[in-house]
Amino acid sequence: PRGPGVYLFRGPRDEPLYVGTSNDLRSRVRSYFSAGEQRSRITEMVALSQRVDAIPCAHDLEAAVRELRLIAEHKPRYNRRSRFPERALWIRLTEEPFPRLSVVRRVRPGAGVFLGPFPDRRAADAAAAAVHESLPLRQCTMRISARAPSGAACALAGMGRCGAPCTGAQSADEYAAIAAVFRAAVHHDPRALVAPLLARVDRLAAGERYEDAAVLRDRVAVLVRAVRRRQRLESLAAVPELVIARPDGADGWHLSVIRRGRLVAAGCAPVGTSVRGMLPGLRATAETLPDADGEHATSVDETELVLRWMEKPGTRLVELTGTLACPAPGTGAFNAFLARVESGRAGRDPFADGRSLGTRARPERVSGGAGGRPQARLASPA
């Protein structure tokens, strides 16, 4: 069918080989069987497929969300993106008298403060290193009793990067004030956490230690981006329900019902139809979410899809239950810093060739030239 939706290529055992989305299903699926398709991986997938299933959707957001859910559920081997959302990593501040940072794969309500998600271990370790650079949190893994701490001070204590609570040199209240800085940074205000790091970057650069300054600057950027992402996601995930509408390009509206960051219903209000008159039907068919206190209703990727759809020009807020607001002051004070990091990364090698070097499934034909010698047609490097 023509229109937005999701398509699935199925293999010999009816298993999903590939899941994709398009605003025009008919044209997109037909393109896989044309001579213009030269990706070797996709050409191999098409050769194995036995049939193509189509799932029509109300609009592009519903199609993108269905694609994301199908990829996470079936993990098709020819999809490379979003196959394993459970592999995302989080930085957790543990719940104990002397909390510490740890990298985990699952967010558990009541188990501490969580920052993330991070795409890989390298990014999570960089953010954790930035936090440890700013705050003297302990890095040992043993449990320390608040009543009778017993242990020997480590090298970090001698360097002034830990208050040595294991020896009793630091009380639980003194340590809690340090951990509170990280909690505040994750929830609403990262200035006390990030400001000492930016000051150290400036000192390193002033001392002509440019490589050390660049390493710390990149770690701080990873940390700030993670805080910003977490705050944006939590602001939407905390809303019990909201209804948003976007123009469909034909004087009608695309409608979405969102609950706790999850798309639970989608529909269309054609031109001449009342948007509010469509809402009772949408709500009646909407997905009912389990009442799980503190649990995320959906994946982080889905909530980000909803956020990007909301932030497009022309989006209208139809109804709202609860409060939709970003924490203040948030990460707005570091917009200029992040912009400088991005511009510096783009300008590191002005002569770099960013073109991909993908292989071709169908090589160029070889035609006979003058004198009977074959000549290959050369493609333009552009």
Image (cartoon, rainbow, N blue to C red):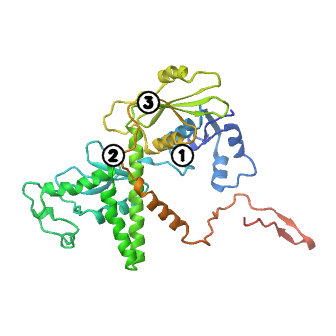
Instruction: From the image, tell me which residue sits under label 1.
Output: 76
Give the left or right position of residue 316, taking residue 115 as reference: right
Residue that extends furthest to the left in the rendered view of this protein: 148
Q: Under tag 2, what secondary structure?
A: loop
| Separation of marks 3 and 2 at Cα, in angstroms | 27 Å
Q: Position of residue 228 (x, y in %)?
A: 41, 51
Residue placed at 16% from the left, 52% from the top?
A: 97
Choose mark 3 or mark 2, whichever is in front: 3
Q: What label sits on residue 320 in the rendered view?
A: 3
Residue placed at 12% from the left, 68% from the top?
A: 152
Decide: is 191 above or below 48.
Answer: below
Sequence-first disc among 1 and 2: 1
Q: Quadrant of residue 239?
A: top left
Question: How dense is the environment of label 3, judged by Cα within 10 Å: few (below 14), some, or many (20 and up)?
Answer: some
Residue 229: tell me if it is visible: yes
Residue placed at 42% from the left, 61% from the top?
A: 221
| Separation of marks 1 and 2 at Cα, in angstroms | 25 Å
Which residue is at the front of the view, 47 or 71? 71
| Number of marks in the rendered image | 3
Q: Position of residue 219 (x, y in %)?
A: 39, 64
Q: What label sits on residue 23 in the rendered view?
A: none
* Mark 1–mark 2 CB contact (< 8 Å): no
Amino acid type, mark 1: Pro
Question: How dense is the environment of label 1, judged by Cα within 10 Å: few (below 14), some, or many (20 and up)?
Answer: many
Amino acid type, mark 3: Leu
Q: Quadrant of residue 238?
A: top left
Instruction: From the image, tell me which residue sits under label 2.
Output: 107
